[in-house]
Structures are given as C-alpha cells and as structure tokens.
Image (cartoon, coloured by chain):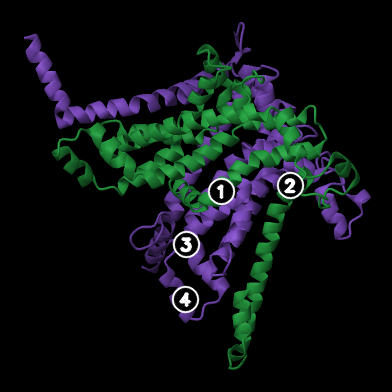
Amino acid sequence: MKTAEKKSFSQWMRSIRGQQILVTVVFMVIPIALLITFTYLPLFKMAQFSFYNMKYIGTRTYIGFQNYIDVFTRDDIFQALKLSLFYLVAAIVQMALALMLAAIVTSGLRGTAFFKGAVFFPYLVCGIAVGFIFKFFFTHGFVLDTLLTHIGFQLNSLPYWLKDTSVNNSMLAATSVWRYMGQNMVLFIGAMMSVDNDVYEAAVIDGANAWQKFWSITMPGIKTMVVLNLILSISGSISAFEPPYVITNGAFGTGTYFVIMDRIAHVNQKVGLASAMAVVLMFIIAFVTILQKLASHFLLDEDETGRTFHERRIAKKRSQSAQ
Amino acid sequence: MANLENAMRPEGRIGASQRGKMKKILIQVMEYLILAFASFWALVPVVSCLVTAFKTPNEYQNTNVMALPQNWLYFDNFGAAWQKAHMGMAFFNSFLILIVVLICSILFSSMLAFVLNRFQFPGNGAVRNLFLFAALIPGIAMQVTVYQIMYALNLINSLTGYMILMMGTDVIAIYIFLQFFENLPVSLDESAILDGCTYFGVYFKILLPLLKPAIVTCLILKGVGTYNEYYMANLYLQDKSLYQVVSTCLYTFTGPMGNQYNYICAGVIITIIPVLIIFIFCQKQIYRGLASGAVKG
C-alpha cells in the first residue's frame, strides 16, 4: 500500500502538471516571502501604529486619530508639505527641458552621444556624492559664485545659496533637476525613436517645419509618457528627500516631508506620528495613481480608430446634436 | 560641425533654396548651443570637484576653486581620503553586498517572471498586482516599521540582514524579465519537455542563458542602485567601524574633514569612478534598460 502511494506521488511529480505546480511553488516562495515580510507586513503594522503613542521600545497607548490630527496641524509638517511645491515646479521644468533636449537629440544632429551621456550621467551618481558636490558648488565664493562673478555679478550682492531662505529651496530643487533630467531625457528619446519614421518623411515632403513636426507627430506619439510622468511627479515631489537630507540636513527651513518624517521617527522616536505621516503619504500616492489610471483610460488609451475615450464622446455628442 | 561645413560648400549657396538652407544651419547652430549649454551645467559641478581633488592643501586655501591645479599628478588627497575614511573596508563590504544581492535578486526576479509568464494558475494576476502595488510605495516611508521587523529578526548590524533587504522586491527587474519572456516562444519549453527535460531544466538550461541581455540590463541598474544606496545602509548597518559601505563611508567626510574640500572631493571622485567606468562601457544597456523598465510604469 505504502509503496503504491509513493509510486503514484513520484509519478505525479514527474507528470507535466505536477512539475508545473512544483516549479510554481518553489520559484515563488522566496520572492513572495520577502515581499510580505518587508512590504506588506510593515504596511499593515504602520496602519496599526498610526493610532498609538509609542516609541520603538516600551509601552504604547492607544490615542485614536490624534496622530492624524497632528499631521495636519503641526507647523513643521505643514511647512514641509508647502515645500513640495518647489519640487513640483522643478519636476515640471525638468520635464520641459528634457523634452526639448530629447527633441534636439533625435532631430538628426550628428555627434550627440557625448551630450546625451553628459546630461544623463548625474543620474548614476550616488546621492551622498551629489550632496557634497552641491555643498561645494553653492558655498559662498565657490563654484557658482565664481561663475556668476565672471559674467558680471558682485560677490557681495550674491546670497548664501543654502542658508538664505528666499533661495535655498529653489536651489535644492534645482539639484534634483540636475540629477534626474537626464533620466527623463533618455526616456523621452526612447519614446521618440519608436515613433514611425515614415510619418516624419511624409511630413517633410508635405513641407512641415521642425516645430510642426514636433507638435503634430512627436507629441501625440509620446503624450502617454509625458502625461504619466507629469502625474507621477506630484507624488514624487512630496517624497523629495535626498537633496535636503544630504545637503542641508533639513536646516534653514529646507526640511521636506520625508526629512521631517525621518527625524520624527528615528531621532524623536515618535513612531506613531511618523507612521501616520507615512499613511497620509500613502493615501496621496494612491489618489495620484487612481488619477493616473483615469487619465490614461479617458484621455490616452486609443481604440482601433486611434481615438481616445474623450474624443469618441465629443464625436458622439456632435453627431447627436447634428441630428 | 561637419553638417555646417557641408552646407557651406559653394554648391549649397546657389539656387532658390539658399534661404531655407541658411535657416536650417542657423537652427542647427542653435541646437548645438543649447546642447552645449546643458552639458556645461551637467558637467561643471563634477569637474570643479575633480579640479579641487588635485590641489595641495596650500593651493586649495589660496587659489580660486575654479583655478586649475598646478600638478595634475598630485594624488595625495586621494590617498589621504582613502585612508582617513577607511574606504578599503567600505569597498570590500560594498563588493560583497553587490555580489550576493545581484545574484539573488536576478535569480529570484527571473524565476518569478518565468512562473508568471509561463503558467496560468489562480492568483497569477493577484501576484503581479501585489508586486506592482509594492513599487508605488516609497521605500523610505516604510522604514519606520521595517526597522521594527529587522529588529525583531535580529538583522540590525548584520551584512546578511542588509543583503536580504536589498534583494527583496525589485519590480523593475521583474518587469524587464516578464517582457523578455514574452518574446521567448513557449515552443522552446515544449520541445525540451518532449526531450525529457524537467521544468527546472527548462528554466536553468534553456531559458536562463537566453535571458542574458535582460540579465545584463538588470545587473547594471540594480548594481548601480545598490552601490549608491545610503538611507537603509545608514539605518541598519549602525556599527560604522565594521559595516561601512561606500555611500555611508563617503558620508563620514562631513565630520572631521568638515570644510577640507580637497579631501572630500577626492573621496567623491573615488566613489564616482566605478560608476563612470560602468557607464562608459554599458551606455546602451543602461539606456535600453531604463526605457524597458518605464514602459509599464
């Protein structure tokens, strides 16, 4: 009896179906275990902690929604949320510049590989190195000031770029443009290269100029990527972290949401409040993601006739009113 | 420039299209100027650092930061930075972490992609969505509670713990592999199975070697990301005398060397060099990898 069972099991193991199930289980166990332990379990705990007043070690007290009330009423957190506007503007500028550069690189100029590489490389540099590079760059009388005095500015009239609260956040946001613009550009170049070349040739024969080609052929071809990146930059700008963390350590009014959260969690050890901040951010990101899905569903996804949902509806309305 | 010369040839000047040609040249000159301007700002911060790294302390004190060094072969700053910050140990640790993390994460994510792509089983879509959603959550937000879990698992101050954390969910790699599997015909698997190969054999002997281009892409992207990672290394590898990695090691320059930028810049250049080398040799794979990682984003 036993041997018969064993045999049938090993037979089953060798059968295609049995193998498929075995492989599926074996290959998925570790990735899923890692995913649950380091993503979903912490997520669950975070939601739980956000209702407590607690430190990493010691007793915890249930305080209901008090942490969430604090998130929206504490001055430092509110200031931090306002700062994300700087990073949002920077993200938009960054995309506009990246689009322009990508259009130039793909327009058929020769010898653009070096430019592309130079603009892209900052993306690969370690965040800490970027921090030092820009501390040095912005120090009074150093790199930026030297360049500016060369073109006629007086050193005395220049602000302390990282301390002066009227400019420091813009400068930090600019470092993030420096770092990520090249990556954006490479993505746009990739999208632009995939636009059918015949269309361009036809347009040239029809006498279209570069500007017309860009607006009527390139932009429609890559608009999905542009819109999605624009929407994603909302959550990206709220999660801005490395420039202020590394360059100013959040001093002189440069603490963004994450910098404040990091301080609350790991210096002040207010784990409950930090969890609440993380949960709020998560909701913002979920909202933005839904927004992105809706945008791609209604405005970008095209049917077989090349029209989006929005365009079909307008066409339908027109035909109705014509009747 | 070659364009410009071509267009300036005599035969280009005659004919009715002369105006159009001139305009085209002007536009191209403008385009080159814009590119040059952009790369100037991209390079200046790094180049000024490079220049400073070659200056003697005295020279650093007394010359403008943008002035070129007197001796381009003055390597003392590099040596000093290397020793003062114990960069040798940091590079060793980072190297160890890179090897383990890269091998494991490439294996795990390609295996997962293999199963998700080849087998239809209940929950296939759910697993995909679980990983996709995880990618939306910013890692730093999670560390408040991940810290607790690491603490409970006794993984703080342990290279193994940090490696496990880093090899976790790499959604971009999973997507790159998923796309790649879609272009590998299922008939490959089937004929191998008919020849008596098991599914493990199909994956390891037949598909894994074919994945090579995707693996190279993932190796580079994940490798650079791991090498540059600072926040978690700083949080979980707290004993800095034993577990320094390159990024946390570089950060120690803020302390004792405060404003001695000739040393700091040398340290920065040392940490950038490996990435620069990878970039120079693997530009194409990096660009392609970014594009394929972003399609599904």
Q: Say whether mark 3 and mark 2 are on the same chain.
A: no
Left or right: residue B21 compared with residue B200: right
Tag 3, which secondary structure?
A: helix
Question: Which residue position holds label 2?
Answer: B50
Label 1 and label 2: CA atoms lie apart by 18 Å
Tag 1, which secondary structure?
A: helix
Observer-nearest of B9 and A242:
B9
Label 4 and label 3: CA atoms lie apart by 16 Å
Question: Which residue position holds label 1?
Answer: B279
Quadrant of image for the C terminus of chain A: bottom left
Tell me how many marks there are. Answer: 4
Q: Residue at 50%, 52% (x, y): give it.
A: B287
In this rendering, does residue B108 appear at all? Answer: yes
- Label 1: few (<14), some (14–19) or many (≥20) C-alpha neighbours in 10 Å: many
In this rendering, does residue A226 appear at all? Answer: no
Q: Which mark is residue A193?
A: 3
Question: Which residue position holds label 4?
Answer: A203
Quadrant of image for the N terminus of chain A: top left
Tag 4, which secondary structure?
A: helix
- Label 3: few (<14), some (14–19) or many (≥20) C-alpha neighbours in 10 Å: some
Given the image, on which type of amino acid does mark 3 rest? Met
Whole-percent x, y for residue A293 in the image? 45, 45
Mark 4 or 2, closer to the camera? 2
Residue A133 image-quadrant placement: top right
Label 4 and label 1: CA atoms lie apart by 36 Å
Q: Residue at 14%, 39% (x, y): give it.
A: B195
Q: Colour of chain A?
A: purple
Chain under numbered label 1: B
Whole-percent x, y for residue A82 in the image? 70, 38
